[in-house]
Image: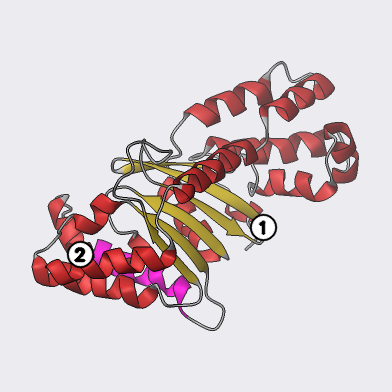
Amino acid sequence: MSRADSLRPDFSLWDLIAVELHRQRQLHRISGAALAAILDCDRSTVARYESGDVQLPIARARVLDREWGTQYLFENLVKHAKSARDLEWWETFKEYERRSTLIKTYEPSLIPGLLQREGYARAVFTASRRTDADEAVAERLARQEILNGPDPCKLMAIIDTAAVLRVFGGTDVMRDQLSYLLEVSEWPHVYLRVTSEQLLGYGGVGGGFAIMQTPTGDLGFANYGSTGNISLDPSDIQEQAIRYDQIGMSSLSIEASQTFIARVLDSL
């Protein structure tokens, strides 16, 4: 099944925009190449708009409304989609994560989910009073398979100092978790860093986030408590990439991060 076939316009405004764009193009009997010329982009970009892999920018939404006389339809859809919460954000997140070739992530409070051990993950879900903790732990561990195999996803993770110091599940659980962090930090496709202890203010203030790169398009994700906000808009993703670089410039090196984690482990 193609990405376009899996669109859910009844749940996602972005999916609705993708479906409506394809419908309107067919209604006006215009080819993808011709629409690309109108939007000043290439044919593959139009295909990615219609498949939902890339979000339609508001400037191009206005071009469509002018060209087709749709009376602010696409502009208003994009405005609402950018301010709305996608009801299927978690399923979309997991789909992009599964297809990712590179993930950059920053976590201010916890060890990143892709690097959590079973005991640590269970302690986190228990602390958050999840009634389905067993299923949640199993799902989290299954997601980690993208880091294994012959062609694993590259992971660049920055963890806040507080997440390394914060003990979840007791000393034994935390020792196991920190030992695992030291182990995976030696993997050739995992780049693990910790923020500086002396950092007073930086781009990480405001919550965790991730940038996922896939062969068909990128996704930006920002975490807000128990829910999240996803974006396929290149400008949003670029903004998160800048934030990641800002945090990285103020973080410890990979070697210094390993030393810090080992020091915390020895203190437990």
Residue 27 vs 164, above or below: the answer is above
The residues colored magenta run 135-148
Of the two numbered discs 2 and 1 on the same chain, state the one appearing first in sequence.
1
Query: Residue 111's mark?
Result: none
In the image shown, does 200 or 99 lie closer to the viewer?
A: 200
Q: Is residue 196 left or right of residue 232?
A: left
Magenta region includes residue 143: yes
Q: Position of residue 153 (x, y in %)?
A: 52, 70
Residue at the outermost bottom position: 150
Q: Residue at horizontal 51%, vertical 39%?
A: 10
Disc 1 designates what residue?
A: 216
Residue at the outermost top position: 71
Q: Amino acid at mark 2?
A: Val
Disc 2 designates what residue?
A: 264
Q: Is residue 96 left or right of residue 21?
A: left
Q: Quadrant of residue 36?
A: top right
Q: How is the image coloured?
A: secondary structure
In the image shown, does 59 or 76 lie closer to the viewer?
A: 59
User: Badges 2 and 1: C-beta atoms under 8 Å apart?
Assistant: no
Q: Quadrant of residue 131?
A: bottom left
